[in-house]
Image (tube, grey):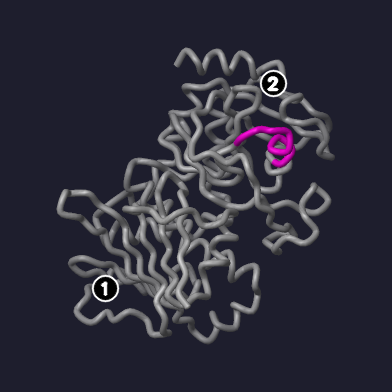
Amino acid sequence: MSAALHVTTAGAAVTVEDLTGRHAAPLARAAGTHSGPPHADPDVRVVVEPGHRPFDTTGLRPVTRGVWSGEDAVVLDSVGGSGFSQSWRIHTDALGGTRLEVRARWAPSPVERAAAVLRSRADALRAQVLLHYPALWWAMTRGMAPLHVSCLEVDGAVVVLAGPGGVGKTTLVADALAHGARATCDNVAVSDGEVALGLREPLRLAVADGGPATGARTTHGRRAMGWSGQVPQLRPDLVVVVRRGDAPLARPVDPMTARRALVAGTYAAGELRRLWTLTAVLGLATGTGPVHPPVDAIAQRMTSALPCLELQLGQVPGLPLQTLLAPHLGQAHRQGAVR
């Protein structure tokens, strides 16, 4: 029985039509939300077709291994090693509007089929290639770039938390949300340097850090949990580089250091590592969007326009973000109101 998922993520209205009936529910969990009402005219439409045969590439031009291009579509074999063969097409309507259409079939190799028994890996790959990456790529065709950040509003100031995975950003976000904060993302956003538009995902927390004991297992021993308080976008007022140290400490940091942390954290993020290759081959095959997203340029635009701090956390999470940043939030909010 077919099923559908309708979400707004990374600034795009996305509809996934699951003609197999097997993927919509796991994708909803990967978005951390239930399906919303149908989109009248989605920006991104993904159709998961039944059958296990790759898309026909007869008459198409080889672009690189596993990628073929035609006049109106690009065919990719096993995107990101997921086992999903895909056909990507930019559709233009009669009024000149455009949308992305992705058709997908589960056509794994024997090795990929065997790897699918690792449920958390298989679920993560499915979410990337059927939901997250199409939305992120469509945002990149509109001048955005992905950033591996958390972005939330605390005491009226919108804070971007930068830093590598595992440093403690999600624990700070989960605590703030529990006390009434709102956020656009915990993990990934797209941005033009002025606005952050969050990717729809659940929070991923270890049980020791306040995560659920019964949530779906994800990577690095964490479990997924849904969350409320997510808004489509926020306009940042403050960039905060999160690090580990001996004791809690917040102090100003120069824009170059903050920019480096934003860029390095984004390229080091495991959940984005397959996106760079996909972006390159799609840009080459379609002539649309960047072959390399402007992560550094957008990080520079953001950090040069906003105050930047370094937040050193203690070895054990403790104080809430509101307390750690209290001396800086009011000033950042006032400066943001002037912009």
Task: Identify the secondary structure beneath mark 2.
Answer: strand
The magenta segment is: 174-182
Kind of residue sitting beneath label 2: Arg
The residue where tag 2 is placed is 251
The structure residue drawn at horizontal position 47% and vertical position 29%, both measured from the top left corner, is 302
Q: Which mark is residue 62?
A: 1
Badge 1 or badge 2: first in the primary sequence: 1
Q: Against 146, is 92 above or below?
A: below
Classify residue 312 as left or right of residue 316: left
Q: Is residue 65 visible?
A: no
Q: How would you rate the neighbour count of disc 1 (Cα within 10 Å): few for under 14, some for 14-19, many for 20 or more?
A: some
Q: Verify whether residue 228 appears in magenta.
A: no
Q: Is residue 175 magenta-colored?
A: yes
Residue 301, percent from left and from top? 43, 28
What residue is drawn where x is 68% and y is 62%?
218
- C-alpha separation, residue under disc 1 versus residue under disc 2: 52 Å
On residue 140, the disc is: none
Density class for disc 2 (Cα within 10 Å; few <14, some 14-19, many ≥20) is: few
Does residue 98 show up? yes
Residue 185 relative to residue 208: left or right = left
Residue 117, horizontal then vertical, whole percent: 64, 79
Q: Name the one closer to the observer, 106 or 42.
A: 42
